[in-house]
Image (cartoon, helix red, strand yellow):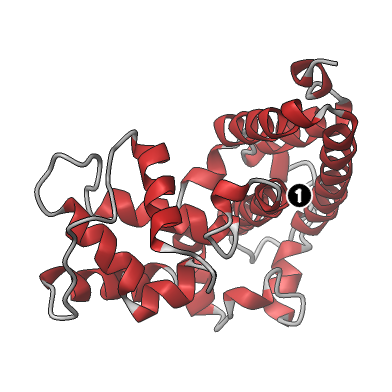
Amino acid sequence: MSYKTEITNSNLEQYMDYTSSPDLDLVTRSTFFYLYENLLRLSDNCIAEIKANYLKLDLDKQIEYLKHVTSEIEYKIKYININTEKVLSPYLKKYELDIKDFPFRSNVDVEKILEEDFSSDIDESLDVNHIKDMHLYFFQYAVYIETCRILDVINFELSEFSIFKSSITKKKFEDLLKYLDIKDDKKRGNKVKLVAIYKRQASRKFFFKESAELSTYFNYINEILDSKFTTKSYSYSEESSHELVIENWIKENCL
């Protein structure tokens, strides 16, 4: 049985087709909540399909299949590669929303906007472009969190990802590496930055499971960066110049 054949089953393909390039043409055909309910159904079906396919495979093919599914999803669904929470920031501030309450059905004003149907007449007093933008940005965020939910299911089975609390925190961690310009083990100071991330209380609380060990952490780093960091000969100080930079980034982008 080929895992590459199995991945073509309809639910995963439908999910990727539905989410890979949403634009204004999509939101004009329906309301945000209709799109959102479809997305939830597709993601549930996708998860069920991945689990079913995974269990059909021989043991030596299971991890290979899960990694292949992950790469396919990450390649095709571009909205997991942007800071979607930043996209929603203006709306969170304007309507006094908490991102944890997404999709904000308890807020009357937001619910009314997201229920607007562009296939019918809209009140001329409303800013149609503003409403369409809201539908699109909120759908982008929905794609982001649902895709991360699918990846969470996959990552649960992959031991190398067990150091992170979720796919969202894993993605945030990789964003932090880019921000700190950590690309390899040859640039002076990169190891100090990595240790500071692992040791700092704020980052440990947000990114890592309590059971995450430094050796496993460096193994993951070496895999994604094709580097050769080791746990030997490292130094750490809470007075490190990187500490404040890391903590401020986490406060601005994660909390």
Residue at position x 44%, y 62% from top? 86
- Left or right placement of residue 41 versus residue 59 in this view: right
- Give whichever of 98, 175 is nearer the camera: 175
**Rendered position, 25 above or below 99:** above
Residue 112 image offset from top left, x and y in percent: 75, 71
Q: Residue at x 38, y 79 (%)?
A: 202
For the C terminus, which image quadrant?
bottom left
| 50 displayed left or right of 223 | right
Which type of secondary structure does the marked residue at label 1 adopt? loop
Indicate the quadrant where residue 216 lies: bottom left
Q: Quadrant of residue 226?
A: top left
Q: Is residue 225 left or right of residue 190?
A: right
Return the residue found at the far front.
232
Of the residues shown, which amino acid type is indicated by label 1?
A: Phe
Residue 111 in the image: state x and y as whole percent. Answer: 74, 72
- Residue that label 1 marks: 118
Question: Pointer 1: residues within 10 angstroms few (<14), some, or many (20+)?
Answer: some
